[in-house]
Image: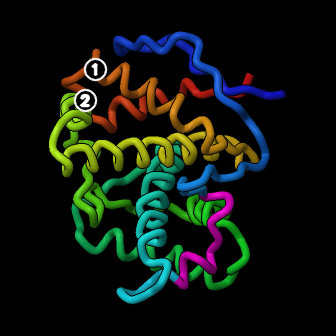
Amino acid sequence: MLLFKLKTHMTLVLALGMLTVGFSSAATAQEGEFEGTSYTCLQFTNGQGENATGKALADLARFWILGYLTGHYYGQEKLDLADDSDTERRVIRSMLSKCREFPSNSVLAVADNLARDRKRSLPKTTSNDFNPQEYSCGDYVDGQKGSASDVLKADLADFWAFAFIQGFVNSDDADVVIPVENKSAIVNAINKNCASNRSFSYYQLTSAVAPMVKPQ
């Protein structure tokens, strides 16, 4: 079986050890977890609109898509983060357009296709007010023990980081899937290293960890 391993050669002060996570060509979501390989484009398109039954999950998918594309473009060395408030709307509009063409496809497959289609700008700050370049590792570590809103933001950061790393890995190989079962292992590595690098932005830390996730 192929495995992922986080290697330790970095310029940051990282204490990753020899973390290995499962590697597969398909993944099944754990109960309560969003998984881009099983959540379909039809679900995403049907979840649009304030009164849509699946709106909450579609909003989570929207956030995942932005994290995934950020990692994918970063891996391609084509990442462009923009301050324009309309940037996110344009990206999601493109995603919805492709999803309507391929309703049975997973959002991961369509997001990967979208990232390879052409270069697109991505928002520095998402519509749910998450900016990984301004959100520091110190904010993240403290937020896990803070108020309810701080804990929620730290949870969103975990979700974004996993999506980013999924996208980064797919930028090199579209057939690779990091199963959701391994999210906690990757998030724990980021958490541990954020505690030792509090001044780094969450974006810096995540983008430093991403290249260390390699098939073995």
The residue at which mark 1 appears reads as 195
Residue at 52% from the left image edge and 10% from the top image edge? 17
- Disc 2 from disc 1: Cα separation: 6 Å
Q: Which residues are magenta?
A: 36-46
Q: Quadrant of residue 86?
A: bottom left
What is the x, y in percent for residue 4? 67, 27
**Could you tell whether 150 is left or right of 46 in the image?**
left
Q: Quadrant of residue 121?
A: bottom left
Helix, strand or loop for disc 2:
helix
Q: Mark 2 and 1 residues: CB-CB less than 8 Å, in contact?
A: yes
**Could you tell whether 177 is left or right of 61 in the image?**
right
Q: Is residue 140 above or below residue 131?
A: above
Residue at 63% from the left image edge and 80% from the top image edge? 42
Q: Quadrant of residue 197?
A: top left
Residue 91 visible in rendering: no
Amino acid type, residue under disc 1 in the picture: Ala
Residue 74 colored in magenta in the image:
no
Q: Is residue 148 above or below residue 62?
A: above
Q: Nearer the viewer, residue 171 or 163?
A: 163
Quadrant in which the C terminus appears: top right
The residue at which mark 2 appears reads as 141
